[in-house]
Amino acid sequence: MASIKEIGQELIEEFEIFDDQMDRYEHLIDLGNALPEMKPEWKTEDRLVKGCQSTVWLYAEAEDQKVKFYADSNTVITKGIIALLVRALSEQKADDIIAEDLAFIDKIGLRAMLTSQRSNGLTAMIQRMKLYALGFKNAAQ
Amino acid sequence: MSTETKVTAALDLAKIRADFPILDQEVNGRPLVYLDNGASSQKPSVVIDALSRYYQNDHSNVHRGAHELSNRATELFESARTTAAKFINASSEREINFIKGTTEGINLLAHSFGRKFLLKGDNLIISELEHHSNIVPWQLICAEREVELRVVKVNEDGEWDLEHFYSLLDSKTKLISTAWVSNSMGTINPVEEIIEAAHKVSAAVHLDAAQAAPHFIIDVQQLDVDFMSFSGHKVFAPTGTGIFYGKEKWLLEMLPYQAGGEMIKEVDFGGTTFNDLPFKFEAGTPNIGGAIGIAEAFKYLMNLDRVALQEHEDAVLELATNLLLEIPGVKLLGPRNNRAGVVSFNIEGIHPSDLGHLLDAQGIAVRTGHHCCQPLMKRFNIPGTCRASFSIYNTKDEVHLFIAALKKAIIMLK
């Protein structure tokens, strides 16, 4: 399994191929569509990420010392963004998730979109993912 | 003959566009198409230059009179008030107050009118289509004064249900405050009828003209409206500017809004007397540069053929509406006709925020969301809409770019 940093670098390179903003979005949408399906019964009120303009559900399970994330959104673009995070953070160790600065996000050329998400959505999603990791870490101790 | 007319009109539009330097740029590798004028309009060079000229040559505090610069600033500031009075055809400069925007105008009115005229058992009328800024100040003052806030329903087309309005209006109604044009749908409200009905029961009417002022020729005397507020930044003027109009007979009776310098006649610990109109409502050093900027924007508009401009704006809006309605799954919010400046819509199965992102990626600026109208969105059971809002400088070519970009976005999102 590649590290978070390595996956981040992969994502930067994937998005670098595109000159056009629409192509970057298309790729982001594809990433969102490729997210494993989140079971409807997991989409409960307590798994909603507050602070997002669109509706985002986030759920995690601990598997073999690693954290596996499941997510969904009612908007296509936000689903793409959460898919980026899931790809980088899912099936990683809790300690690594907690320590990660996610610097790659700023380098994938989706600045405008991420800026509008930053104040409300993105930070809240990252925070929720780190909280899951922290919860599993504390439970394991 | 007709060819010549067309050529002249096209040339004029090119000139208007050239007056707004910000429009000439690319966004995400494509020419900017600015369709977020309902949120804020762009500024013509004359406004930008007037601000710069003022700060470079003429700035000092106003109404102090001890030296040349103060005299110049005062003259510019007060002549701005005269220009504003002319722009809305107020009967006197005493009825014009500079404010920082529509929101402040409504808060001023709620405070100054509310604490003077609203008594326990009275009622005040707004409608379902109001912007939050024309809801929340009234909720606060109504709670404070023990006054009932009545809300006129809108019909399926997003228009005032007039029958409901008449059932709410009675001898205890003190004030009706409504948008002239809905910011989220563009609906033009029947303000003449509302004003006439209100005056029959001696109620006053305030118009939130934030979305009307950029498009309409305003005549407050002909309307016989009691109060009006609008923001400068939606009418080609700097941010932090606006106009609050009130009939003198009301303003004389109303309490001051904020207290401090400028608004007093004489301060004494035994009791303070307030300044005359319009200064009673302008505590502290005003936004002098902003007032000069707003006056310049009004002059800019008044120097154009406003009837022709309105026809142009209506034609652009009509084209956008027609082309939108040809797209499968499009649902308009608001009436098919009887709108100004705005077309608000949803596309079946697509979230408006996704549309906003993909339009931006193609250089098209629109607004998505609830447009500060959460009660209206609840009324229609939608999370929000995609809103394209037009101004004098938008062209039919831009409408075609918008529609093409929208179609591309829909393909990607479906």
Image (tube, coloured by chain):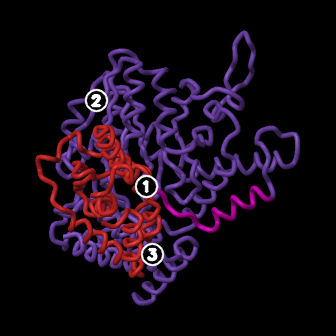
Q: Colour of chain B?
A: purple
Respond whether the residues carrying marks 3 and 2 are from the same subunit.
yes
Mark sitting on residue A100:
1
Q: Chain of mark 2?
A: B
Q: Position of residue B377 (x, y in %)?
A: 25, 47
Let me know if residue B215 appears in the view: no
Q: Chain of mark 3?
A: B
Let me know if residue A79 appears in the view: yes
Residue under numbered circle 3:
B28
Q: Secondary structure at mark 1?
A: loop
Distance CA(mark 3)–CA(mark 2): 46 Å
Q: Position of residue B211 (x, y in %)?
A: 42, 53
Q: Quadrant of the N terminus of chain A?
A: bottom left
Residue under numbered circle 2:
B150
Give the extent of the magenta segment: B40-56
Residue at position x 17%, y 49% from top?
B156
Q: Count residues near mark 1 (Cα–Cα under 10 Å), then give few for <14, some for 14-19, many for 20+.
A: few
Q: Amino acid at mark 3?
A: Asn
Q: Colour of chain A?
A: red
* Front position among marks 3 and 1: 1
